[in-house]
Amino acid sequence: MTPQLRQHIATLVPGIAIAEEALAPFFQTRSVKKGALLLSEGAPCNEIYFVNSGCLYLFYEHEGQGEVIHFALEHWWLTDYKTFADNKPAVFAIAAMEDSEITYLSRSAYDALLLQFPLMAVYFNKIHERAYGAALFKQKTFGTMTREDFYRYFSNTYPHLIRRIPAPLLASYIGISTEALKELQAKTLS
């Protein structure tokens, strides 16, 4: 278990009294290169990822284009939550936006962890509440704002992230072309 994950658990569940040595065997850590595909659409979704460093993104293919729907920075978890939960083929894909270090749990390790340490369910419930809330909020803002206003909102809310995201991925996330994104960026700077 990495120091980043241990701190994250302690932050979300203060006073948790589970020894790190007891939790560590459930988690695995690895480095992934920029562009590495961690999950493909249609494949079994058997892992949930915690980002120690770097950035991952969730997307799906539509008409030959990757449509980005979510980013996961340091200290965020990411998986295809629907298919991780119901053991169906993935409807989303996950890739590394940058060289990243991730800690992950397999589905079987996740289930065993929660059975052995039920308090960890409180931690993961908080993770899932945050993920669901963020998805709903994005849906609302996306449906009620112009793309220009959404870009401004996203830039103001995540200024550290906006500088890291390559233009094609950001344009996809916003739902516009790369050219339209460049126009928005130029307009915002002027």
Image (cartoon, grey):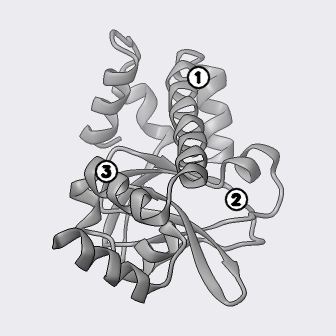
Residue indicated by mark 3: 74
User: In the image, residue 127 lies at what x, y percent?
Assistant: 51, 33
Which kind of residue does numbered mark 2 sit on? Cys
Label 2 sits on a secondary structure element that is: loop
Give the residue at x 54% y 71%.
175
Q: Earlier in the sequence, mark 3 or mark 2?
A: 2
| Mark 2 and mark 1 residues within 8 Å of each other at the beta carbon | no
User: In the image, residue 122 lies at what x, y percent?
Assistant: 54, 19
Which kind of residue does numbered mark 3 sit on? Glu
Q: Residues within 10 Å of mark 3 (few under 14, many from 20)?
A: some
Residue 19 visible in this rendered orientation of the protein: yes
Distance from disc 2 to disc 1, alpha carbons, whole Å, reads 20 Å
User: In the image, residue 34 lies at what x, y percent?
Assistant: 36, 78
Q: Residues within 10 Å of mark 1 (few under 14, many from 20)?
A: some
Dividing the picture into quarters, in which one does residue 132 lie?
Answer: top right
Give the residue at x 31% y 72%.
99
Residue indicated by mark 2: 45
Which kind of residue does numbered mark 1 sit on? Ala
Q: Is residue 162 above or below residue 74?
A: below
Nearer to the camera, 103 or 37 = 37
Nearer to the camera, 20 or 103 = 103
Residue indicated by mark 1: 121
Label 3 sits on a secondary structure element that is: loop
Give the residue at x 59% y 44%.
140
Q: Is residue 27 above or below residue 165?
A: above
